[in-house]
Image: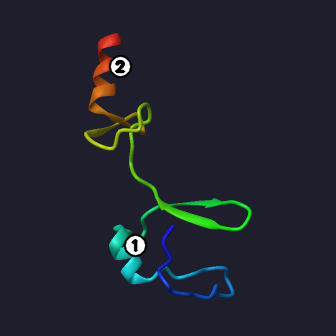
Amino acid sequence: MKSTGVIRKIDELGRIVIPKEVRKKLGINIKDPMEIYADSNSITLRKVEDKCTFCGNTKDLIEFKGKLICKKCFDELYKNN
């Protein structure tokens, strides 16, 4: 993990601001969902990417009954029914 050299303080509500330069570089926009991971001494934030429920593919996604499925998996499901 590469340090940015930027230091921010946590406010009274437990929030911390991610610098604009970092958000821009990583393509993080307002209201983007972020996943939070924690271990014994660090916290990692990861932008949640839309992916296929079955195979994890991030391309050619369609929504089916509230779930995201890639075209390949959708075609397989359709073929088996």
Q: Is residue 26 above or below residue 54?
A: below
Q: Residue furthest front?
A: 2
Give the CA separation, mark 2 to mark 1.
Answer: 35 Å
Residue 77: mark in rendering: 2
Residue 59: mark in rendering: none
**Would residue 7 appear left or right of 21 to someone viewing this image?**
right
Question: Who's the residue at 34% across and 26% down the image?
Answer: 73
Give the image location of residue 58, x and y in percent: 33, 44
Question: Who's the residue at 53% across and 65% down the image?
Answer: 45
Query: Which amino acid type corresponds to the residue marked 2 in the rendered image?
Result: Leu
Residue 30: mark in rendering: 1
* Residue 81 in view of the camera: no
| Mark 2 neighbour class, 10 Å CA radius: few under 14, some 14 to 19, many 20 or more | few
Q: Is residue 5 above or below residue 69?
A: below
**Would residue 39 appear left or right of 66 to someone viewing this image?**
right
User: Is the residue under label 1 in contact with that under label 2 (CB below 8 Å)?
Assistant: no
Q: Which residue is at the front of the view, 41 or 34? A: 41
Q: Quadrant of the C terminus?
A: top left
Question: Who's the residue at 40% across and 52% down the image?
Answer: 49
Give the image location of residue 29, x and y in percent: 37, 70
- Within the image, what quadrant is residue 9 found in? bottom right
Secondary-structure class at tag 2: helix
Q: Is residue 78 above or below residue 55?
A: above
